[in-house]
């Protein structure tokens, strides 16, 4: 059970890191370099779909971590700092759920409201501003599972 939680946390943190550091820049840079018409919209759609699929994966990782903690506590002995670990895992899962369900839907609606690519709108356009805020919220929400996952991994590896 402990091993399953370790793997789930490592995959979750690693996956988010790869999405941000490798996948997103690769998609946007490759499409921009090829000067594909409607490139930013295509890049946004491709990355949006990758993120949508990763959200589903993150929900499973969260369930594995929480399930492992609860099972270990029920079967005994309780993991050290059980409440803290459960709180971290729950916060990670809630942040991912909110990002994947609420924020992603709002981002998609902002794209529709913008009539395409929000970055193509003038700087002061409220639709562009709204999209930028939603993008920032989405990014900040992903910090929760990364930081929480690193803390859980550290705790598991040092106990």
Image (cartoon, rainbow, N blue to C red):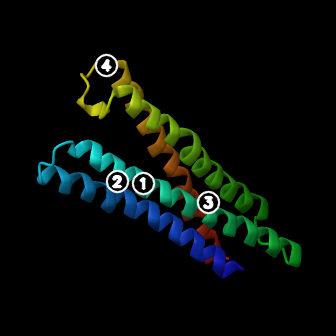
Mark 1 packing: few (<14 Cα in 10 Å), some, or many (20+)?
A: few
Q: Nearer the viewer, residue 65 or 78?
A: 65
The residue wearing badge 2 is 46
Give the vertical position of 40 relative to 122 (above or below): below
> Which of marks 3 and 4 precedes in the sequence?
3
Asked if marks 1 and 2 touch (Cβ < 8 Å), the reply is yes
**Residue 32 percent coordinates (x, y):** 16, 49
Residue drawn at point x = 21 percent, y = 46 percent: 39
Horizontal placement of 63 versus 112: left or right?
A: right
Labelled pair 4, 1 in contact (Cβ < 8 Å): no
The span from disc 4 to disc 3 (Cα, nearest Å) is: 35 Å
Residue occupied by mark 3: 59
| Of labels 2 and 3, the one closer to you | 2
Q: Earlier in the sequence, mark 4 or mark 2?
A: 2
Secondary structure beneath dot 3 equals helix
Nearer the observer, 59 or 88 = 59
Give the mark, 4 or 1, whose residue is nearer the N terminus: 1
Q: Is residue 108 above or below residue 96?
A: above
Q: CA distance from mark 2 to mark 3?
A: 20 Å
Label 4 SS: loop
Q: Are marks 4 and 3 in contact (CB under 8 Å)?
A: no
| Secondary structure beneath label 2 | helix
Quarter holding the N terminus is: bottom right
Residue 22: image location, x then y, percent: 31, 62
Tell me the crowding category of disc 4: few under 14, some 14 to 19, or many 20 or more residues within 10 angstroms, Cα based: few
Quarter holding the C terminus?
A: bottom right
Q: Which mark is residue 125?
A: 4
Q: Which of pointers 4 and 2 indicates the residue nearer the eye?
A: 2
| Label 2: how many Cα within 10 Å (few below 14, some 14–19, many 20+) | some
Instruction: Name the mark on residue 49.
Output: 1
What is the spatial separation of the Cα atoms under label 1 and label 2, in whole angstroms?
A: 5 Å
């Amino acid at each position: 059970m402990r091993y399953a939680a370790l793997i789930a946390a490592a995959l979750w943190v690693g996956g988010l890191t790869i999405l941000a550091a490798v996948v997103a820049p690769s998609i946007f840079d490759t499409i921009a370099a090829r000067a594909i018409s409607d490139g930013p919209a295509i890049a946004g759609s491709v990355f949006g779909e990758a993120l949508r699929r990763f959200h589903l994966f993150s929900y499973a990782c969260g369930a594995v971590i929480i399930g492992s903690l609860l099972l270990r506590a029920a079967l005994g002995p309780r993991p050290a700092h059980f409440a803290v670990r459960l709180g971290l895992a729950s916060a990670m899962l809630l942040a991912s759920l909110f990002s994947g369900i609420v924020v992603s839907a709002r981002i998609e609606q902002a794209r529709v409201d913008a009539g395409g690519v929000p970055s193509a709108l003038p700087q002061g356009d409220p639709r562009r501003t709204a999209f930028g805020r939603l993008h920032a919220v989405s990014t900040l929400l992903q910090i929760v599972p990364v930081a929480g996952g690193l803390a859980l991994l550290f705790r598991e590896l040092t106990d």
